[in-house]
Amino acid sequence: MIIYKDIFTGDELFSDSFPMELVDDVVYKLKGKMRTESFEVSDALIGGNASAEGGGDEGGNAACQSGVDVVMNGRLNEYALDKKSYMTHIKEYMKRVKERLATDKPDQVETFTSKVQTFVKSVLGEFKEYQFFCGESMNPDGMLVLMKWDGETPYLFFFKHGLDEEKC
């Protein structure tokens, strides 16, 4: 399994266990799905014995959490911002990624700079269609993950050059 981490914050964002494709060699597009998790505690685990105690007490209700599987697994947090704030963030973020690439992977700088602008322009053109998420640390210097719904299916977008791959 490969875990993908934010290069600036170290937050684990996703793994290769989700259906994904690489778009224009700059963005990973992951297909998510809605799921509900139930957090139910069995009385047997805490020493309860329904038959000996009469079983009249129903106990507490199970807690449930619903959301997109990629978001829940990556412990991503929704991040609200307007178009102007996003433009400020993405310009600074792309600048930092480019500087990092120049040091670590100079052969990738041209690919990143030429192709990422096209993707960002398409996001800005449909800005209201996207939701934004940040990693678990909620560090504003990290990647903002984009999510766009296509009917009932959520798709999440991660910048390839802003990720470190770690094999587990």
Image (cartoon, rainbow, N blue to C red):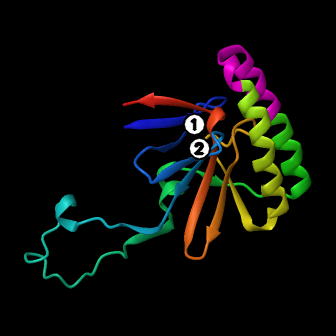
Q: Residue at x 75, y 41 (%)?
A: 116
| Residue matched to label 1 | 11
Residue in front for this viewpoint, 146 or 57 = 146
Q: What are the residue bounds of the magenta stretch? A: 94-108
Q: Is residue 63 above or below residue 137?
A: below
Q: Position of residue 147 (x, y in %)?
A: 65, 59
* Count of marks overlaid on the render: 2
What residue lies at 78% left-to-right and 21% top-to-bottom? 99
Left or right: where does residue 19 sit relative to residue 99? Answer: left
Image position of 94 with respect to 35: above or below: above
Pinpoint residue 165: horizontal percent, then vertical percent: 50, 30
- Can the viewer see residue 114 in this picture? yes
Q: Nearer the viewer, residue 151 or 45?
A: 151
Q: CA distance from mark 1 to mark 2?
A: 6 Å
Residue type indicated by callout 2 = Glu
- What amino acid type should be assigned to the residue bearing mark 1? Asp
Residue that protrudes farthest toward the top in the picture: 103
Q: Is residue 81 visible?
A: no
Q: Is residue 97 covered in magenta?
A: yes
- The residue positioned farthest toward the bottom in the image shown: 56
- Above or below residue 138? Residue 112 is above
Mark 1 in CB contact with mark 2 (< 8 angstroms): yes
Q: Quadrant of the C terminus?
A: top left
Q: Is residue 105 above or below residue 65?
A: above
**In-front residue for pair 48/115:** 115
Residue 26 - label: none
Q: Main secondary structure of the magenta part?
A: helix
For disc 1, the neighbor class at 10 Å (few under 14, some 14 to 19, many from 20) is many
* Residue bearing the label numbered 2: 136
User: In the image, what residue occupies the spot 74% across and 25% down?
Assistant: 109
Q: Say which residue appears at 84% left-offset and 50% top-offset.
A: 86
List the single residue furthest toward the right: 84
